[in-house]
Amino acid sequence: MIQRIQSLYMFLVALIMGGLFTWFPEVKNETGDLLYTRDEPVFFALIFISIALAIIAILTYKKRKRQFVLNRLNILSNFILLGVFVYRSLSVPGETLVSEKGIGMFLPILSIVLLVMANRAIIKDENLVKSVDRLR
């Protein structure tokens, strides 16, 4: 299960999204207005969905097609989370602190890249199984 590279990628996605929820509880701009906080239902739901999909995909290691679909749904939820981050940071007037805003917005992009790499590894495994079945 965990020895496959795509499982490692999905585990890293779960850790990254958990880190996003834990280490970046709120982002403020220079005037002290909150851009977003982890207690808001939209952010909490999207981060929780991403973590849950990654863990469920790891546990369904015998069903590669389902794992592929779960990763696609996870990519979609991360794109939505990234869009919400961008929308909230652009809709609040005033300047924001780049260091606080930048790393929190980078983590969904990193998780999307890891999920795409996991999907490529799943496709390679699926092709390998198909080629072995042809030899039988």
Image: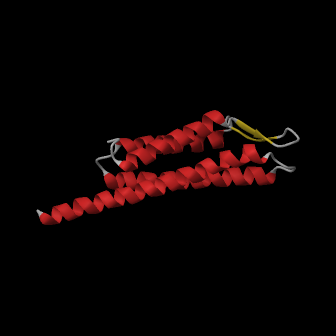
Q: Quadrant of residue 47?
A: top right
Residue at the (65%, 39%) spot, across then down: 41
Q: Quadrant of residue 38?
A: top right
How does the figure colour the protein chain or chains? secondary structure
- Report how many numbered discs are placed on residues in the image: 0
| Extreme residue in the left direction | 136
- Confirm whether residue 22 shows in the render: yes
Residue at the (64%, 34%) spot, across then down: 23
Query: 44 or 127, which lies in front?
Result: 127
- Confirm whether residue 72 shows in the render: no
Residue at the (69%, 50%) spot, across then down: 85
Q: Quadrant of the C terminus?
A: bottom left
Where in the figure is residue 93, as x and y percent of width and height?
A: 86, 50
Where in the figure is residue 89, as x and y percent of width and height?
A: 76, 50
Q: In the image, 93: left or right of 2? A: right
Q: In the image, 72: left or right of 30? A: left
Q: Quadrant of the N terminus?
A: top left
Q: Quadrant of residue 59?
A: top left
Query: 50 or 115, which lies in front?
Result: 115
Residue at the (74%, 45%) spot, across then down: 99
Where in the figure is residue 15, as x and y percent of width and height?
A: 51, 39
Q: With respect to residue 5, does 133 lie above or below?
A: below
Q: In the image, 59: left or right of 90? A: left
